[in-house]
Amino acid sequence: MLLLNSCFSPQLIIKVQPSSNENVFWYEGQPIAEAKKDSIVTRAAFSHISGEYYIFDIEVFNEREQPFLVSPEDMFITISESLKLPAMDPEKIIFSMEMEASRIEARQKNAAIAAGVLVVGTAIALAVSDTDNGNSYDNDYYDDDGSSGLRTKLFLY
């Protein structure tokens, strides 16, 4: 029991907090960083980690009359003065996941077709080899019916 107990280690607990110089408010126990510039209000809150990605909930409010383009390529997270990590485009990630799922499905269908061809080919090869192997189970007996001179072939299995 002690040997198995040592095989598992606790998972890392990661907490992402806004820096102390940001405008932060709390909602349902979660810190949300908020910034306002030129009538554009942005809010960001850490959501969770998925694999190697840190997922954030982002809200952008446009309080001006002109439209405003929100682009993931222009977003980043600042770790330190010298380290800024770019945001990933969620549409590109979803597209790559869909492409991988499509490739997996195509591989599975191709494998099923190949397996079907192999089964049919094996069945044909067995049928052809079974008819001419000298071990036929057909024992031919002919019976002469006497009156018409016809011969009837009987098959015994």
Image (tube, rainbow, N blue to C red):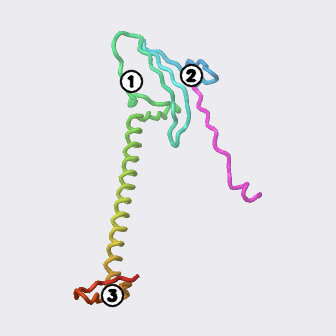
Residue corresponding to mark 2: 32
- Asked which secondary structure carries label 3, the reply is strand
Residue corresponding to mark 1: 70
Residue 107 in the magenta stretch? The answer is no
Q: Quadrant of the C terminus?
A: bottom left
Left or right: where does residue 44 sit relative to residue 153? right
Q: Which badge, 1 or 2, is on the more N-terminal residue?
A: 2
Residue type indicated by callout 2: Ile
**Quarter where residue 73 is shown:** top left
Residue type indicated by callout 3: Asp
Observer-side mark, 3 or 1, equals 3
Q: Say few, some or many: other residues with alpha carbon within 10 Å of mark 2 (under 14 / 14 to 19 / 20 or more).
A: some
Q: Which badge, 3 or 1, is on the more N-terminal residue?
A: 1
Kindly report the distance in space between the C-alpha atoms of the residues bearing marks 3 and 1. 86 Å
Report x, y in % for residue 131.
32, 82
The answer to which of 14 and 132 lies nearer the viewer is 132
Q: Quadrant of the N terminus?
A: bottom right
Observer-side mark, 3 or 2, equals 3
As displayed, is residue 69 above or below residue 119?
above
- Asked which secondary structure carries label 1, the reply is loop
Residue corresponding to mark 3: 140
As displayed, is residue 151 above or below residue 53?
below
